[in-house]
Image (tube, rainbow, N blue to C red):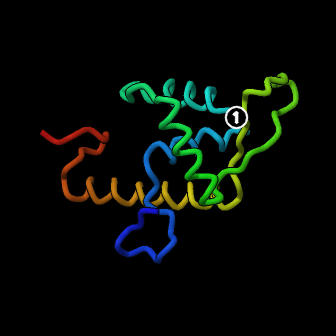
């Protein structure tokens, strides 16, 4: 598990960007892998295709960190035994919020340094 230089051992921050995106999707409710990929790709136009092996490696890591857990399909989702559903845990919610705060702080530093303009674009 990667950690920040100032983070205590075992701290899951910083999250891999794909892990953070997965948690953001799961904040909206339980979902299966393919639906998670579709949602992430629809939100992030500059992101290249997410390959199943990469998604499931990140899901395995999130499961190991107890940030997500396997769950039963939501009612009305249909019964497809090939689909495994996941939901975010309470710990996952706290970690996602901490990661959002960490990223917010980095953006604030970039703004303060003059690297970014107030609209979020790069300074020329």
Q: Position of residue 66 (x, y in %)?
A: 65, 59
Question: Residue 119's quadrant in the figure?
Answer: top left
Q: Quadrant of residue 2?
A: bottom left
In the picture provided, is 85 more to the left or to the right than 105? right
Please indicate whether residue 32 sits to the left or right of residue 49 in the image: right
Q: Is residue 28 above or below residue 20?
A: above
Residue 6, image x and y in percent?
Answer: 38, 75
Decide if residue 82 is on the left or right side of residue 64: right
Q: Total of numbered circles in the picture?
A: 1
Residue at 26% across, 54% down: 110
Question: Front-most of 57 and 10?
Answer: 57
User: Vertical placement of 93 versus 71: above or below?
Assistant: below
Could you tell me which quadrant the C terminus lies in? top left
Q: Answer above or below: position of 104 versus 43.
A: below
Residue in the picture at 34% in, 73% down: 5
Q: Nearer the viewer, residue 95 or 108?
A: 95
Name the residue located 60 percent from the left edge and 32 percent from the top edge: 36
Is label 1 in a helix, a strand or a loop?
A: strand
Q: Is residue 16 above or below residue 91?
A: above
> Where residue 52 sits: x, y (%)?
52, 30
Count residues near mark 1 (Cα–Cα under 10 Å), then give few for <14, some for 14-19, many for 20+: many
List x then y, in percent, for residue 32: 68, 32
Q: In the rendered image, which residue does mark 1 sit on? A: 31
Q: Residue furthest left?
A: 124
The residue at 84%/22% (across/down) is 78
């Amino acid at each position: 598990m990667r950690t920040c230089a100032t983070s205590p051992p075992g701290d899951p921050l910083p999250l891999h960007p794909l892990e953070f995106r997965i948690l953001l999707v799961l904040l909206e409710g339980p979902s299966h892998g393919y639906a998670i990929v579709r949602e992430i790709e629809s939100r992030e136009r500059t992101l290249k295709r997410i390959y199943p092996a990469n998604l499931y490696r990140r899901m395995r890591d999130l499961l190991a960190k107890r940030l997500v857990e396997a769950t039963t399909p939501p009612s009305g989702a249909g019964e497809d035994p090939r689909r495994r559903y996941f939901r975010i845990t309470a710990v996952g919610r706290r970690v996602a919020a901490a990661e959002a705060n960490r990223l917010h702080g980095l953006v604030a530093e970039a703004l303060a340094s003059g690297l970014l303009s107030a609209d979020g674009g790069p300074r020329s």
